[in-house]
């Protein structure tokens, strides 16, 4: 079994910063891509940023130059540094990991979500 636990959400004023963390644990052999998604009320879940095991990153246009995704492979942890936050960034943020388990099964896992609220 694999678990992803997120932390770091909260309430912040527009222009402020937050750093999200997501730690994976359990029967992990290796982790391929890791990603952050978000879902605002009444909207579909959207991909925010991705990072490969080698450190290559990609971002949705609306967060480019404001958000930074990074990871610590030794800790099986992915981070999302969010700067210059805007009210439209308000959402529940979810991490996702493409995991190869110790039994050779490859599967995507989700965290439980963490709320980010940006006030104007």
Image (cartoon, helix red, strand yellow):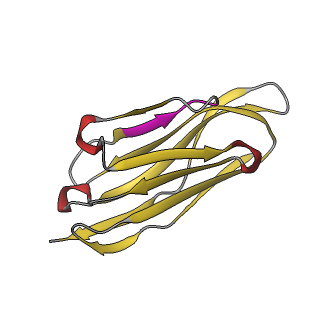
Q: In this view, does 63 lie above or below 119?
A: above
Q: Where residue 51 appears, x then y in whole percent? A: 52, 34
Image quadrant where one finds the C terminus: bottom left
Q: Where residue 60 appears, x then y in whole percent? A: 31, 35
Q: Where residue 18 appears, x then y in whole percent? A: 40, 65
Count of numbered labels shown in the rendering = 0
* Magenta: main secondary structure: strand
The residues colored magenta run 48-53
Q: Which residue is drawn at 26% across and 53% down?
A: 40
Question: On the picture, is 46 further left or further right than 51?
Answer: left
* Quarter of image, res 52: top right
Camera-nearest residue between 114 and 59: 59
Looking at the image, which residue sits at the far left? Answer: 120
Image quadrant where one finds the N terminus: top right
Q: Where residue 114 appears, x then y in whole percent? A: 45, 62
Q: Which residue is drawn at 84% across and 33% down?
A: 102
Whether residue 34 is in magenta: the answer is: no
């Amino acid at each position: 079994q694999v678990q992803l636990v997120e932390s770091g959400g909260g309430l912040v004023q527009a222009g402020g910063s937050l750093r999200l963390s997501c730690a994976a644990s359990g029967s992990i052999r290796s982790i391929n891509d890791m990603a952050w998604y978000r879902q605002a009320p009444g909207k579909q879940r959207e991909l925010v940023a991705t990072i490969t095991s080698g450190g290559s990153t990609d971002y949705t246009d609306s967060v480019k130059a404001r958000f930074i995704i990074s990871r610590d492979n030794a800790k099986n942890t992915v981070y999302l540094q969010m700067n210059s936050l805007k009210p439209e960034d308000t959402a529940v943020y979810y991490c996702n990991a493409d995991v190869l388990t110790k039994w050779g099964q490859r599967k995507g896992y989700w965290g439980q979500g963490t709320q980010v609220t940006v006030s104007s």
